[in-house]
Amino acid sequence: STAQVRSNNNDGVSVVKKFYPNPATTSINFELSIGTDKPYSLQLYNFMGRKIYETGTVLQQLIIPLNGFFRGLYIYQLRDRFGKIVDSGKFQVVK
């Protein structure tokens, strides 16, 4: 299935995101509707709140391999250059 989330960043511009598949097995894809002129970072956390993945520059599409990810629930956070969360959500890994 595909999830779509709408939220607003500092500029009031809608950030539309699709992430799929959910639940995921080998990789998860993020599609972002953001301008490439603004730097964003993406962090993934496990269900206990430990950061397990981070990327510094997010473009409009990002594929994250799930090697080393255990079965369970994960939370993602998209942050702007000031560290403010502009979008977040959860996905499940099944193996």
Image: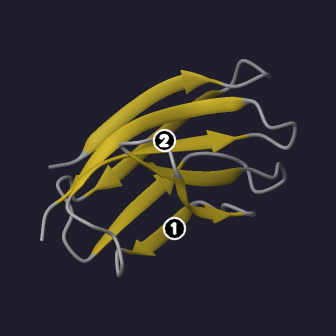
Point 84% across, 53% down: residue = 37
Point 59% across, 60% down: residue = 60
**Frontmost residue, 33 versus 88:** 88
What amino acid is at disc 2?
Gly
- Whole-angstrom CA distance, mark 2 to mark 1, is 22 Å
What amino acid is at disc 1?
Leu
Name the side, left or right, on which 21 lies relative to 51.
left
Q: Which quadrant, please, contains the C terminus?
A: bottom left
How far across and down, in percent of the image, does residue 27 sit? 31, 73
Point 65% across, 46% down: residue = 34
How far across and down, in percent of the image, does residue 14 sit? 59, 26
Point 48% across, 41% down: residue = 49
**Frontmost residue, 73 versus 77:** 73
How far across and down, in percent of the image, does residue 10 sit? 78, 22
How far across and down, in percent of the image, does residue 18 sit? 38, 47
**Frontmost residue, 53 versus 87:** 53
Question: How many numbered dots are placed on residues in this image?
Answer: 2
Q: In the picture, residue 77 is in which quadrant?
A: top right
Marking on residue 2: none
- Label 1 near label 2: C-beta < 8 Å? no
Above or below, 91 against 21 in this view is above
Mark 1 residue crowding within 10 angstroms, few (<14) / some (14–19) / many (20+): some
Is label 1 in a helix, a strand or a loop?
Answer: strand
Marking on residue 49: 2
**Disc 1 target residue:** 62
**Frontmost residue, 26 versus 7:** 26
Is label 2 in a helix, a strand or a loop?
Answer: loop
